[in-house]
Image (tube, rainbow, N blue to C red):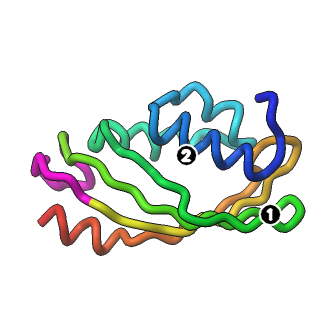
Amino acid sequence: MTTTSPADVMETLFERVWNHGELAQIEQIFAKPDSARQFISAFRAAFPDLHHTIEESIVDGARIVVRWRAAGTHRSPWEGRAAIGRVVTFSGITIALVEQGQIARHHTEWDRAGLMEQLG
């Protein structure tokens, strides 16, 4: 990855990985990519047109907080729920520590309950 600021790293994560499905970027973005690769791959398989929008970000040195929203069509099973073929929306906040151009640690709080309610 040629960009190393926390804002650039998160922009790459949301735009290239989540929105465009460039899963190979996960290896460059995350210092420990295994769980991120697994989660993002499964999620994008169930919601292939998923699109995240960064609504706000705050950077403090190597730390960044990103408030985001997402929408996508549920096209294949996820978390035991059959595909409903409808667009769902949800939002969340991700806090990350970026070191040497990679996400060293991160925590995301998102409206999983709201998503599950939409899935029925």
The percent coordinates of residue 117 (x first, y second) are 20, 71
CA distance for labels 2 and 1: 16 Å
Kindly identify the residue that appears in the image at 83 percent across and 41 percent down.
4
Disc 1 target residue: 63
In which quarter of the view is residue 3 placed? Answer: top right
The percent coordinates of residue 91 (x first, y second) are 42, 67
Disc 2 target residue: 14
Using residue 50 as the reference point, say whether residue 92 is left or right of it: right
Kindly identify the residue that appears in the image at 73 percent across and 44 percent down.
8
Q: Earlier in the sequence, mark 2 or mark 1?
A: 2
**Quick check: 58 above or below 79?**
below
In reply to whether residue 4 is colored magenta, the answer given is no
In which quarter of the view is residue 42 placed? Answer: top left
Crowd rating for badge 1 (residues with CA inside 10 Å; few <14, some 14–19, many 20+): some
The amino acid pointed to by label 2 is Phe
Crowd rating for badge 2 (residues with CA inside 10 Å; few <14, some 14–19, many 20+): some
